[in-house]
Amino acid sequence: MIYLTRKLEFSASHLYHNPALSAEENKRIFGKCNNPHGHGHNYTLEVTVAGEPDPVTGMVLDLKELKEILEREITYRMDHRFLNYEVPELKGQIPTCENIARVIWNLLEPKITKGRLHKVRLYETPDLFADCYRNGAHGA
Amino acid sequence: MNDRLKIELGRRYRFSASHRLHSDELSEQENRRVYGKCNNPHGHGHNYVVEVRVSGDIDPATGMIANLMDLDGCVEREVIEPFDHKLLNEEVAVFRKHVPTTENLCKEIYQRLKHFPDAKVESVRVEETSNNAFEYAGEELWDRLAVQQKGKGSD
């Protein structure tokens, strides 16, 4: 089995606020991420696909094809967007690194038909990231 | 493909500390042979990076596996405060008995963090330099030994 990883960067803004909680609770739980004007990050996404290389092409899947899927599904949806308001998949969710990684997984998994999606790692900063994978598949 | 989706949160922390690799069970000559320049009696230091991965369900009210403020507080209290700018051999009790290799450091940090109440600690990775990294995900035997050692008052 080969695991291939493609990176992608996008920049977006967000804020953490749960309307079901009081202003004080929002402030206590989310701290400065609760700033109503939002704030932004340069996100780095690593997408790992697992599979066997095709004997003719030597590829698990064509990187160009993967790049196009990522641009269509992720860059177009999320780059230079305010995640709370402009990404319908995140509607009603707090756009934490965990939730964004899960949304990205759900967007990509059905689109990757050669090999299979193995792991999504989303860095919000170089010191904070979320991993998403099918239970038992962690490894590479 | 019906396996449950699993989410983990990873966070990286930094501390700087000094250590000396030396085993009382080896002769001076053997210590020098095994540990090389890491056996220098005056010790030396590193900028360590600690990467902690935790897993759990995302709380729909917060969107979080664990609140970062709580995880940061726990790591600060259990690891950064007691290790940063310290001589590990002398100032961290467990390393008076065990050689402070990064393997042992990794296990010790895991022991200190594994009871974090808000999420399951999946693994602790320690980078001693940008070229050396060690990762530990716990194991029952080591956990049992550590509990026994704790009972003897070694830490």
Image: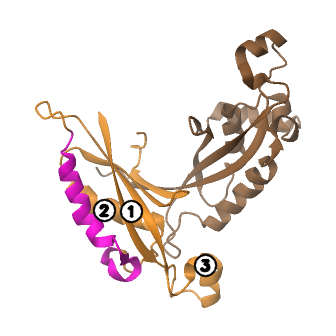
Chain colours: A orange, B brown
Instruction: Provide the residue span drawn in magenta.
Output: A60-89
Pointer 2 local density, CA inside 10 Å: few below 14, some 14–19, many at least 20: some
A74 over B101 or under it: above or below: below
At horizontal 66% and vertical 30% (from top left) the residue drawn is B141
Can residue B100 be found in the magenta stretch? no
Could you tell whether A129 is left or right of B121 in the image? Answer: left
Tags 2 and 3 both on a single chain: yes
> From where the camera sits, is residue B65 visible?
yes
- State the residue at coordinates (71%, 49%): B15
Among numbered discs 1 and 3, the one appearing first in the sequence = 3
Residue A107 vertical position relative to residue B125 in the rendered view, above or below: below
Residue B50 percent location from the top left of the image: 63, 47
Give whichever of B148, B138 is nearer the camera: B138
Q: Which residue is mark 1?
A: A102
Q: What amino acid type is highlighted by mark number 3?
A: Lys
Q: Is residue B27 visible?
A: no
Q: How far from the left and from the top, in percent, is residue B19?
A: 78, 34
- Asked whether disc 2 touches disc 3, contact meaning CB atoms under 8 Å apart, the reply is no
Residue A108 image offset from top left, x and y in percent: 27, 59
Name the foreground residue: A33 vs A21.
A33
Q: Is residue A84 left or right of residue B51?
A: left
Badge 3 is on which residue?
A: A32
As helix, strand or loop, the secondary structure at mark 3 comes to: helix
Element type where label 1 sits in the image: helix
Against B49, residue B119 (above or below) is below
Is the stretch drawn in magenta largely helix, strand or loop? helix
Which amino acid does the dot numbered 2 rest on? Asn
Q: Are marks 1 and 2 in contact (CB under 8 Å)?
A: yes
Depth check, front residue: B69 or A38: A38
Residue topped by disc 2 = A106
